[in-house]
Amino acid sequence: MASYEISASGIRLQQQILDTVANNISNVNTLGYKARRAEAADIKFNLHHILELQTGEDDPQSAGGLLQATTKLWAQGPAQITDRELDVAVFGEGFLRVNTGAEIAYTRSGSLNVDEDGMLVTSDGAYVLGVDGAAIQVPEGSSIARIDDTGNVLAVEVGGVDEQNIGQIGLARFENPQGLLATGDSLFSETEASGVAIAGVAGGEGYGRVVGGVLEMSNVDLPDEMTRMIEAQRAYQLNINALQTLDEMVTRALDLRR
Amino acid sequence: MIRGWYTAASGMVAQMARQLSNAANLANLSTPGYRQVDVQVEEFQNMLLTHFESQDEFTLGDLSTAVAMAPLEINPAQGSLRETGRALDLAISGNGFFSIQAAGGNEYTRNGVFNLEPGGRLVTSDGFQVNGVGDTPIIIPPERMDEVWITSDGTVQAGDDVFGQLQIVEFAEPGQIESNGRNRYITDQEPLASPDSSIHQGYLEMSNVDVNQTTVDLMEAQRAYEFSQRMVQMQDETLQMTVRDLGRV
């Protein structure tokens, strides 16, 4: 019955909002995580259709609410100073480009490491790509000293003092970052909706700076999420009440047949 | 007597419609820019009862035959604004609507969750163009997105460069516009300029559903429905008595 579907759609929508909030809350400590926001929309209210006074319509949903989209909130996450030479944060626009082995992906999570082959990798082991699109390798016998504002990776030989530039970390930007696909581990991949990645250099026009010794934390605003959670729970309950009321009314109508 | 039966039954239908509109409003407590729908229950056209039995007819008085539902009304009350800090979240205070280019022509919305599509055109979250003044697209060069600010009259700019001005319209009868779903409204009314509306960047307008009023109304509709149902039953019992007892004579 179309009338039961109204409150059912509201219950479902609030459940989806709660799922989004729960996901954000569980990523409150994930480096480079970007909060998501569930976007609700209404379903056209067609009273005559619901009351079954009008026939010939095939749309089962005649009123209520639905989840239309999920917006990624790209606001800068708070910076945490670590003074670790392999930590980088992008201040402003731009993603680090990484090669996961399966594809080129994009991330804001800048806790980097050097693997056993001397390659610069993310915390998940994906190769960090330079402006030339190649992975960055630390020469044997050297270690990374610092990463400068434009993403240059400077290494020194063990026991030495002279800095040697071993590559420049590249950034990428998208015309519609909203269209990026989140693939987990704070990684995003390019889609048709996002447009192709526009490669660039930190500090260039339209790109942010790279700051070494700093990490970008999750941008989840915990008090805000808690507020949303309470609201969604209340709204969930109210929709259940409406459903129960409807059910009692329908029971009344059925009593007429006794 | 059967007449009364229909009156009571029509009351049940009307109260059910009220319940359904309340349910739809409660389903949209979290929908930005949502406008509460109100079902108005009104008396059906009254009829005159005339006494025919004697030679000279005389009027007994008028009688309501049923209740009916007036066309749905959209409640135009302002919803509260909530700060989101997102550059392309826009809220309107005042009676205005954003004008958007949907598949079947211009439609209107109060939900200001916008995005840039590749190429920089300003679109709604389901991908329809947000109209600038004169139904033109607003194109923001994506590399300048982080400096974009939108003034209270809807001018979209970055630094000294102006990329357009949002088309904000209002309607002479704001309650008579029709919901088209997905936060969009349609109407035959001529869109008018809306000089008193102002745009707030980084805010969203929340649903204007009045939770307390709706909850009370839900209970009221349920009780009124039960009452009408009782009336139908009483009519039935009376009829039953008539058939049974009169037939016995």
Image (tube, rainbow, N blue to C red):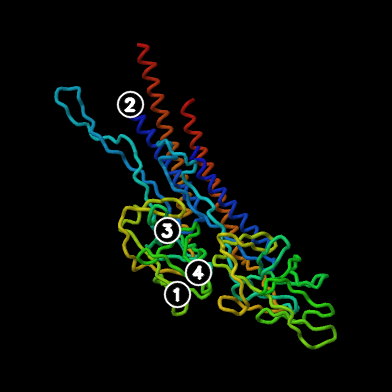
Q: In this rendering, is residue A120 above or below B69?
A: below
Host chain of mark 4: B
Q: Which of pointers 2 and 3 lies earlier in the amino acid sequence?
A: 2
The kind of secondary structure element at disc 2 is loop
Disc 3/disc 4 C-alpha distance (Å) = 17 Å
Query: Looking at the image, which is closer to me, A208 or B113?
Result: A208
* Rendered location of residue A228, percent (x, y): 58, 60
Q: Residue furthest bottom?
A: A161
Disc 1/disc 3 C-alpha distance (Å) = 22 Å
Disc 4/disc 1 C-alpha distance (Å) = 15 Å
Amino acid type, mark 4 = Gly
Task: Identify residue for label 4.
Answer: B202
Question: Quick one: label 4, few (<14), some, or many (20+) residues within 10 Å?
Answer: many
Amino acid type, mark 2 = Met
Question: Quick one: label 3, few (<14), some, or many (20+) residues within 10 Å?
Answer: many
Question: Which of the labelled discs sits on residue B1, or is there none?
Answer: 2
Residue at the location (39% across, 70% down)? Answer: B165
Task: Identify residue for label 1.
Answer: B157
- Mark 2 vs mark 1, foreground winner is 1
Disc 2/disc 3 C-alpha distance (Å) = 49 Å
- Mark 2 vs mark 3, foreground winner is 3
